[in-house]
Amino acid sequence: MNEPAPEQLPYTETEIETMAAEDAKAGRFLTKMLVFTFCYTVIVGAYVIYWSLQN
């Protein structure tokens, strides 16, 4: 009988660790970008409300 060949991962352990580090870095960047966008929206929205109530 033929035995199935052992499964090989498409990436080495080092490549997986590198990709995980890059993914974490990208996740931190996206989080900072979303927080900045949210804060900007809240500040601009508050200013527009303030400005519209003054007229």
Image (cartoon, helix red, strand yellow):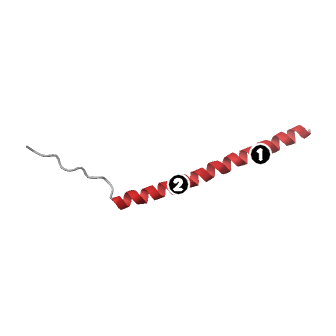
Mark 2 burial class by Cα count in 10 Å: few <14, some 14-19, many 20+: few
Side (left or right) of 55 relative to 5: right
Q: Is residue 48 left or right of residue 41?
A: right
Res. 46 image quadrant: top right
Could you tell me which quadrant the N terminus lies in? top left
> Label 1 neighbourhood size at 10 Å, few (<14), some (14-19), many (20+)?
few
Work out which residue is located at the far left of the displayed protein and give it. Answer: 1
Indicate the secondary structure of the residue bearing disc 2.
Answer: helix
**Vertically, is 6 above or below 15?**
above
Quadrant of the rendered image containing residue 54: top right
- Disc 1: which residue: 44
Instruction: Report x, y in % for residue 44.
Output: 77, 45
Horizontal relation, residue 6 to residue 55: left or right = left
**Residue at x 46%, y 58% (from the top left corner):** 21
Q: How many marks?
A: 2
Q: Quadrant of the C terminus?
A: top right
Disc with the residue nearer the chain's start (2 vs 1): 2
- Tell me the element at label 1: helix
User: Percent position (x, y) of residue 50?
Assistant: 85, 42
Q: Amino acid at mark 2?
A: Ala
In the image, residue 36 lies at what x, y percent? Answer: 67, 51
Q: Is residue 41 left or right of residue 7?
A: right
Residue type pointed to by label 1:
Val
Residue at the image point whose x is 20% and y is 50% from the top: 6
Residue that mark 2 sits on: 26
Name of the residue lying farthest toward the right = 55
In the picture, the disc for residue 24 is none
Using the image, determine if residue 52 lies above or below residue 33.
above
- Measured Cα–Cα span from mark 2 to mark 1: 27 Å
Marks 2,1: beta carbons within 8 A: no
Residue at (72, 45) in percent of width and height: 41
